[in-house]
Amino acid sequence: MTVLVRSRRVVTPEGVLPLGVDVVDGRIAGLVPYTTHEGLDLGDVALLPGLVDTHVHINEPGRTHWEGFATATRAAAAGGVTTVVDMPLNSLPPTTTVPNLEIKKKAAYGQIAVDVGFWGGAIPGNLGDLRPLWDAGVFGVKCFLSPSGVDEFPALDANGLTRALQELARFDGLLIAHAEDPWTLTEPTGPSYSEFLDSRTQEAEVRAIETVIAVARETGARAHIVHVSAGDAIAVLREAQAQGVRITAETCPHYLTLSAEEVTGTAFKCCPPIREAANRDALWAGLADGTLMGIVSDHSPCPADMKGLDSPDFVTAWGGISSLQLGLPAIWTEASARGFSLEDVVRWMARGPADFAGLSSKGRIEVGADADLVAFDPEAGFVVEAGDLAHKNPVTAYQGRSLKGVVQQTWLRGDAPGHGRFLTRGAR
């Protein structure tokens, strides 16, 4: 056994403890007293488990000029993320069949700096592909209830949603849903952010979530709501969970740390939108009581010209926030100001997403887990400069923002990132 690293502040499921981490063959073989004289000594710099981000749009192949596996996974490693699960859309072809999944894996092969898993997709006409995708190891299948923004990944209507959940219930599969009600959404009346925000109300989000809950209750299937932005949705989700509906949900750094009042341009555009500052309190409360299982990035980049930064128009600009590298410091900045601890952040950004995805060896510092580790200085700070980030296109809504917390080093299975593996559901 070799002590890889030791710290006075190792964040474990049992608390923050002074420990050294023994590693054998990429796994944590033991946790030893900090006073051992072996290994890299971080002192008071915290040691966290590698973060798990189950909501990343990598876009390769087909739209690799938006984002690719090499750049996205380097950004992940730089941000302390050691596991990502790739979304099925924005690549060409979308991951809606097993052959398309194999095309995606072939494109990623040899390029991934961290471990990568895949979601499948549920679209009109591919009901017969859901079980084969599940058997091929995807973590679940994603659907949209409103237009996705790309023609090759159309939304499911009410009947399609019911049929998909009925099919998934047969083998206890998982549906993850972009929940905005198409009949409640309206066209923006102009190009400004206020007009864009008015077109995608909390009501649209809540109605769609209620639809998913109703069908999940009827079918007994598992369902998950991605990127919850509406504080009004928390009570709805909490009640359904209390009634035994198999429904989970996530939120994202931009909904927890940014606000409509501070939007300065189209770098902030995403769907559902960033809402008013007062809305954030309900989202933080939903994290605190476990209604929301965790925080994931919804990293969804595009070329700068698609963002329309020179002449901001929130109607035509592509919607997506690039934050894969910045999620940990962005959340720590806000969480610490609200009185939350590093243990809370690890629960929301590492163990929670890992447990949600069924990755029992990820997101925790304990014997038997993968030695995915992050040296994180929670007291240090920096100012975001888009050009310093590793993702492909230097656009971020966090440009110029002062953040607290610096990732000093990341380990993947006890080694430097760069040797990522493909993950399948239930992998250890």
Image: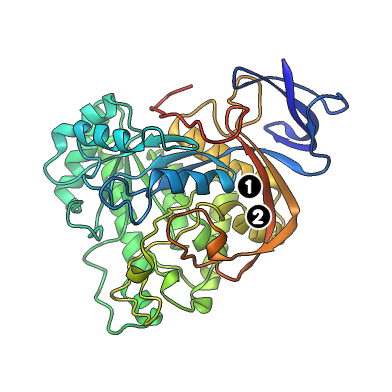
Q: Residue 199 location, x and y as percent?
A: 31, 75
Pointer 2: what residue? Answer: 332
Q: CA distance from mark 1 to mark 2?
A: 7 Å
Question: In the rendered image, is residue 291 in sight?
Answer: no
Question: In the rendered image, is residue 21 in sight?
Answer: yes
Considering only vertical position in the picture, is 139 above or below 301? above
Q: Amino acid at mark 1?
A: Val
Q: Residue 228 location, x and y as percent?
A: 43, 56
Tell me what residue is drawn at x 54 percent, y 72 percent.
Answer: 277
- Looking at the rendering, which quadrant does residue 9 occupy? top right
Task: Work out which residue is located at the far top of the displayed protein and give it.
Answer: 1
Q: Residue 252 location, x and y as percent?
A: 49, 55
Q: Which mark is residue 345?
A: 1
Q: In the picture provided, is 62 more to the left or to the right than 72?
A: left
Q: Residue 408 location, x and y as percent?
A: 69, 46
Considering only vertical position in the picture, is 347 above or below 235? above
Q: In what element is the residue under mark 2?
A: helix
Q: In the picture provided, is 350 more to the left or to the right than 193?
A: right
Q: Which mark is residue 189?
A: none
Nearer-N-terminus badge (1/2): 2
Tell me what residue is drawn at x 21 percent, y 27 percent.
Answer: 132
Tell me what residue is drawn at x 50 percent, y 40 percent.
Answer: 353
